[in-house]
Amino acid sequence: MLKTLKFICILSIIFEFSLSAQFSFDSISNSSEVLKKIFDNSSKYHLQIIYTQVSYKKNEPVFTTYTLNTNPKNYFYCASLVKLPTSILALQKLNEIKVKQNSVFFTDSSCYCHKKNIYDISSENGYSSIEHYIKKMFLVSDNFAYSRVLEFVSPDYLHKKLKAYGYKNVRIINRYDGNCNEKNQLISNPISFLDSNLNVIYSQKEHVSKYSPLPSSINVKVGKSYYNNKNKLVKSSKSFEKSNYLNLLDCHSILLNLIYKNKFKISESQREFLIKYLTIYPRQSIFPKYDSIKYPDNYKKYSIFGDSPRYITDSTIKITNIVGLSYGFMIDCARIYDKKNNIEFMLSAVIYANEDGVLNDGKYDYYNVGMPFLAELGRQFYNYELRRK
């Protein structure tokens, strides 16, 4: 029988949950053959799940959370999950320097791998801004946008602020759009913000962040072999010791705190802006505008709709989420809300969809293993919520 692990965080800023013993993961794992296969081989598939029931008492949310295999030592590659804290803290930093989020944003360069940029033809005025980059990150997981925003925020600022909020082991140091080596990853570009007349209103010099090693207790080796950057097969596990790191508990908590508590130093309108673009489909955006064929409704909605038709006709279910997909790992961290049926819960899950155990070979099992599992997992939890009083 699967054991239900209940996680009580010492830091109330991360979790404030009331725990009960009414739920068992067995009720979900045995509900479908698609789920049972993965649950029965949870170690092979690196399975992790967090389920938070959301109830209300005197109009205040009350959280009851259940976890499965969420020990932070159980490493997975976080991929685009880091775009959530990076975006939140970008807005917080803008507030601190008193710059508007739609101000023109210019990234300069100070070494070979930096991307010098000020224009963005997908924006309304043709220029880049932190606001526009966040939209692109949340709508289609744009890596160029993430990298530019990371350069403004800087790893040092991110780590300092996240640690103050209780997230001590998060590490965000890598861009996702270039060939910066280990040393240059830590060099943040010189940047400037400009007004509508292109006059500089704020400048930030090049900044070199400190390297933040992960705790030695975390096993950062994955797979049985991998192809290196010279396309040579290396017959050993791949190490992610110098990669970004965000565990599932922390990502789940950051999303929960954004949606329900606004623990971060951002305005209510900024919070609503973030939630909006974590929720809507790419086709619902005007600037930037996306092709619904290339970016269908389920492009980033893995839970419930991941294996559904490209155009989602169900207008009652709203999913506010952030996803990750890389090196065989698929992750979805989501709040699922259905006002019509009075359903509201959070569900985060990780699955490793790489049957041959080889990394960087381009042969992952996202759409025949990972996506069917995450979609069915979301549906079964939704059905459970329908039955739950």
Image (cartoon, rainbow, N blue to C red):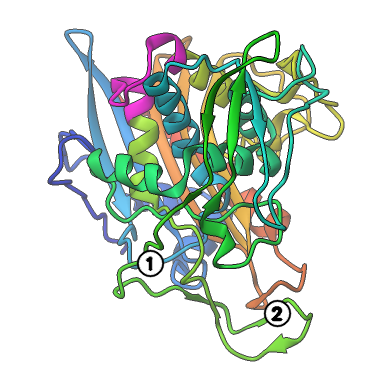
Most common SS among magenta residues: helix
- Residue 158, percent across and down? 39, 43
Query: In percent of the image, x 58 and y 89: which residue is there?
Result: 236
Which numbered dot is residue 74?
1
Q: Quadrant of residue 254?
A: top left
Residue at 65%, 14% in the rendered image: 199
> Is residue 121 or residue 6 the one in the foreground?
121
Residue with the most extreme left position: 10
The quadrant of the rendering that contains the C terminus is top left
Q: Say whether marks 2 and 1 touch (CB < 8 Å).
A: no
Q: What's drawn in magenta, residue-wise?
A: 257-271
> Mark 1 Cα within 10 Å, few/some/many (few <14, many 20+)?
some
Q: Which residue is tagged 2?
A: 228
Residue 326 position within the rendered picture, expressed as x and y whole percent measured from the top left? 63, 58
Say whether residue 148 is magenta: no
Q: Secondary structure at mark 1?
A: loop
The three-letter amino acid code for the residue at tag 2 is: Asn
Percent across and percent down for residue 366 are 68, 56
Please tell me whether residue 120 is drawn above or below residue 196 in the rendered image.
below
Which of 258 and 266 lies nearest the eye of the viewer? 266
